[in-house]
Amino acid sequence: MNLFQRNAASLQSASDALLAERAGDGDAAAFEALARRHLPSMRAQARRLTMSDSDADDAVQDALLRAWSGMSGLREPAAVRGWMMRIAANSALALIRRRVPSAGNEDELALRADLNPGPESATISGSALSHLGLALTRLPEQQRQCWVLREMGGMSYEEIAKLLGITETSVRGRTTRARATLVKEMEAWR
């Protein structure tokens, strides 16, 4: 194993805190290791918020650029995962706000087709996860955002309130209503 391979292997096994510190000092390889580690979670969260693969990719790309430029200002390197997830959520929400509603949104139509399979494929692959995805598409956007940020993003009610510019009470209410709807929708999977 050459020096480059050993360095790459050591970065993969390094803690988030160490990688964040090194990235904050300008180490691009450390930031790349962090990005690779947290990219799937960031993309999944952005995907659930935007309901679009292409929008999620755009949001994550923007989030990674903002994370790289802000890494030197990170006060708690051990909290880098949550920090990166919040940046991804902010990017996704900003993209949603800029989005012009259109009836011909191909990504949204493709998502609905994927989540609403025909009888044969539903019998073969009918999973709770795809049913949850469909149930999420039926939620009002504000409820879906709060639920995804809380349950999948692990954000606190206070963080969500600041991010969305609403009160904590509103976040709690929207999350509670989303949970109640999802419980009803998912009863068949109990």
Image (cartoon, rainbow, N blue to C red):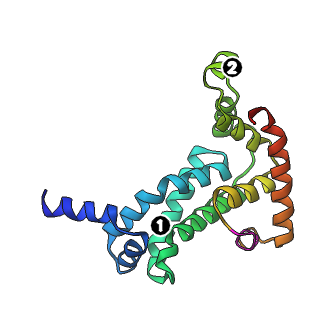
Could you tell me if the residues under marks 2 and 1 are in contact, i.e. CB atoms within 8 Å?
Answer: no
Q: Which residue position holds label 1? A: 65
Q: Main secondary structure of the magenta part?
A: helix
Badge 1: few (under 14), some or many (20 or more) residues near its Cα, within 10 Å?
few
Nearest to the eye among marks 2 and 1: give it. 2
> Picture coordinates of residue 179 (x, y %)?
81, 51
Q: Position of residue 58 (x, y in %)?
A: 54, 54
- Nearest the viewer among 52 and 85 is 85
Q: Is 159 part of what is drawn in magenta?
A: yes
Say which residue label 2 marks: 118
Identify the magenta region.
156-161
Q: Upstream in the sequence, badge 2 or badge 1?
A: 1
Front residue (pair 90, 41):
41
Residue 185 shows in this picture = yes
Left or right of 123 on screen, residue 137: right
- The residue located at (80%, 36%) in the rendering is 187
Residue 163 is a magenta residue:
no
Q: Spatial distance from mark 2 to mark 1, Cα to Cα?
A: 40 Å
Which amino acid type is shown beneath numbered disc 2?
Gly
